[in-house]
Image (cartoon, grey):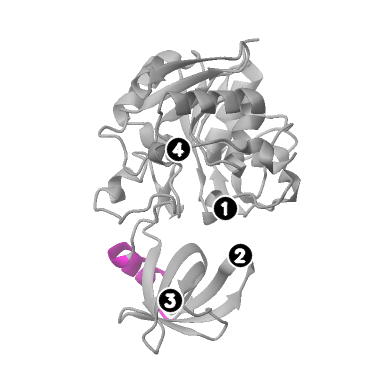
Amino acid sequence: MKTDLFDYELPESLIAYYPPEKRDGGRLLVAMPGPQTVRHSAISELPRLLPAGSLIVANDSKVIPARLSARRPTGGAVEVLLVRQEQDSDDFCVWNTLCKANKPIRVGDGLHFGDIAMGTVTGAGEMGHRTIRLNISGDAFRAYVAQNGAIPLPPYIRRDVTDSDRERYQTVFARYEGSVAAPTAGLHLTDSLLAQIRQAGCDVDFVTLHVGPGTFRPITAQRTDEHLMDTEHYAISESTAQKINQAKADGRPVIAVGTTTVRTLEGNAAANGGRIVHGESATNIFISPPYRFNIVDGLLTNFHLPKSTLLCLVSALGGREFILDAYREAVSQEYRFYSYGDAMLILPERP
C-alpha cells in the first residue's frame, strides 16, 4: 500500500511531553471495528471493558538507561545509544550502538566512557549502527551504564530527562533488561488495575520482546512493502505458550498490550504454522493491511506517529479507514498522543 495512506494531521500541542499524574489516569478511546463505532472512556474502566475470559498478554521487557556520553581521545563529545549487547566475557564486551557526533564515527575510532572503559569501533552497519568493543566485562559495563546512563526518551519528547522518567518510562511489571524504548501501552497499567482485570474474569500473562530504536523509524519508502524492519529479540515461556494456544483452542480472545506484544505473538506464530512455540528467537515481522492475524484478537495501544509501522499494525487489526477515523476523533477530542499519552482499546469483533 502507499505510505501516504497512513498519514493524518496532528497538532503539536497534543503530543504528551509528560506522563499523566497517575499511571491509570489517562483517557481511553474504545474502538469497536465490528459495528465501526467508538466511545470515550478511561484507563481506570479497562477491567469492565475487556471481554470476560480474555487472555491479556503484555511485554515485560525493561528499559535500560541506554543513552551515554562518551569522548574521543581528542576530547570530542559523542552521544552513544546502546542497542544490544552482542558478546560478553570476563575482560571485554561488545555492543551494537547508534552514535551521534560532529564528525563521522569510523571503524578504528576510540571512545572513552568516563575513566572506566575504553571502546573501539569495530564495525559499521546500516542506518548508523556501530559495533563497539569495550575493554571491560559486560557486568562491569552494565554497572557503569546503570550509574551513568540516561533513560532514552523518544525523539519527539523534546525535553531533558528527569529523575521521574526512570520510574514512569518503565512498566510496573518490567522484569528483563534489554529495551531502549518502553512498551508504552503497558505504562498505563498498575498492580491494582491488573488485580481488577483478573477479578473481572480475565487471565494475565507476559512475553518478553526487547524493543529497539527501529520502533521510532518512520517509513520513508513510497510503499509500505519496501520498508525493512529491524530485528528484535524475544522470549516466550513454555507455560505462556500453552496458555495462549489453549485460549485460541477454547475460542477465548487474546488481547495484546502494545504493538511489541503483537509482533512477538504474530512473529512467533508466523514461524510456527500459526501456533505459539516457546523459546527465544527474533522477529522482523512487519504487520500492515491486509495482514491476517493468527493469535491477536484485540489490542490496548497508545496513539502512534503518522506513516509509522505501528500505525500500519493497528490499521491491519482495526481496518485502515476506521482507525484513521478514530484518530481524527481523538484529535478533535484533544486526546494526548504518543508514548506518554492516552490509549486506544481495539475490541475483538463479536462472533
Marks 1 and 2: in contact by CB < 8 Å? yes
**Residue 324 position by quadrant:** top right
* First-in-chain label (4 vs 1): 4
Left or right: where does residue 37 sit relative to residue 267? Answer: left
**Residue 276 position by quadrant:** top right
Who's the residue at 56% across and 48% down the image?
Answer: 234
Sort mark 3 into few (<14), some (14-19) or many (20+) by Cα contacts within 10 Å. Answer: few
Nearer to me, 40 or 261: 40
- Mark pair 3, 4: CA separation: 51 Å
* First-in-chain label (3 vs 1): 3
- Mark pair 2, 4: CA separation: 29 Å
* First-in-chain label (2 vs 3): 3
- Mark pair 2, 1: CA separation: 10 Å
Sort mark 2 into few (<14), some (14-19) or many (20+) by Cα contacts within 10 Å. Answer: few
**Residue position marked by numbered label 3 in the rendering:** 90
The answer to whether residue 319 is visible is no
**Residue position marked by numbered label 2 in the rendering:** 127
Is 141 placed above or below 50 here? below
The amino acid beneath tag 1 is Arg
Q: Between label 2 and label 4, give the one nearer the viewer.
A: 4
The residue at the far bottom in this view is: 74
Q: Which mark is residue 217?
A: 1
- Mark pair 3, 1: CA separation: 35 Å
